[in-house]
Structures are given as C-alpha cells and as structure tokens.
Amino acid sequence: MSPAPAADDLLGMEYFPIAEVRSRLEAQNGGWEVLHESPNLEVGVLVRIAPTSDPPVRHTADEVYVVLAGEATLEVEGDSRRLRPGDAAFVAVGKEHHFVDYALISVLVLFTR
C-alpha cells in the first residue's frame, strides 16, 4: 500500500485561508496579500480602511472583485457601482479603476493572466 500524498502533491486543488488573511489584513489597517499564483490565475485579498485611499490603477489582466466585508463604490472609467458583501464585479484589462466612499472594504481578487 502506498502512502497518502502530501498536501503539496495533490493535483488540481489548493486551499486558500481567505477569512484568516482578511482578518489579519484588517487588523493591520489594510493591505494586499497574494494567496495563489499560477500561469493562468492570481488570487489575492485586498483590504482598504479609511482614511487610506485606493489609488486609481490599470492592470494588464482581467480581474474580478468579490466583496467579503464592508461596502464601497467601485469606479471604472466613469461608471460606478456600489458593492456590498456577496457582490462581485468584473473589470476588463486596461480599465482605470478604484474603490471610493468606504470605511472598510475587503475583497477577494481574481486576476487572469
């Protein structure tokens, strides 16, 4: 009988401790942490806490934001949408965007590559 594979040897699956990372970043007054990087995907948690601003950015990949906690307005090149926990938003490659009007916003971010 062969031994069970180590967690790192499992193919096709990876665990992300999203709640743990979110709690840590919120306790540190915000930040960004990458949870996964692969040839086709990057996954991370972003936390912004006022009065820290979220500067406008453009990325070289499509991305999806999934709100974990808090609420904010996502502005994307003249369009805006209020996001709350459970909401998700897609931002196309190259579009300038940022969060505004928040006390705290915690999001799961998924980037294509």
Image (cartoon, rainbow, N blue to C red):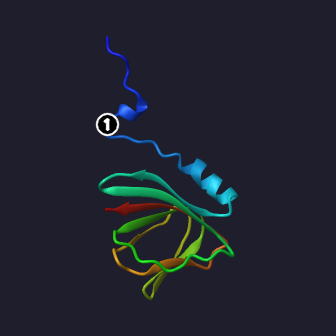
- Left/right of residue 84 with respect to residue 37 in the rendered view: right
Q: Is residue 91 above or below residue 69?
A: below
Give coordinates of residue 3: x percent, y percent: 36, 17
- Direction top: furthest residue: 1
Q: Give amino acid for label 1.
A: Leu
| Residue at position x 56%, y 68% in the image | 84
Q: Is residue 6 above or below residue 68?
A: above
Q: Nearer the viewer, residue 31 or 47?
A: 31
| Residue at position x 59%, y 55% in the image | 22
Q: Quadrant of the C terminus?
A: bottom left
Q: Quadrant of the N terminus?
A: top left
Element type where label 1 sits in the image: loop
Per the image, the residue denoted by label 1 is 11
| Residue at position x 37%, y 25% in the image | 5
Q: Is residue 29 above or below residue 74?
A: above
Q: Residues within 10 Å of mark 1 (few under 14, many from 20)?
A: few
Picture quadrant of residue 70: bottom right
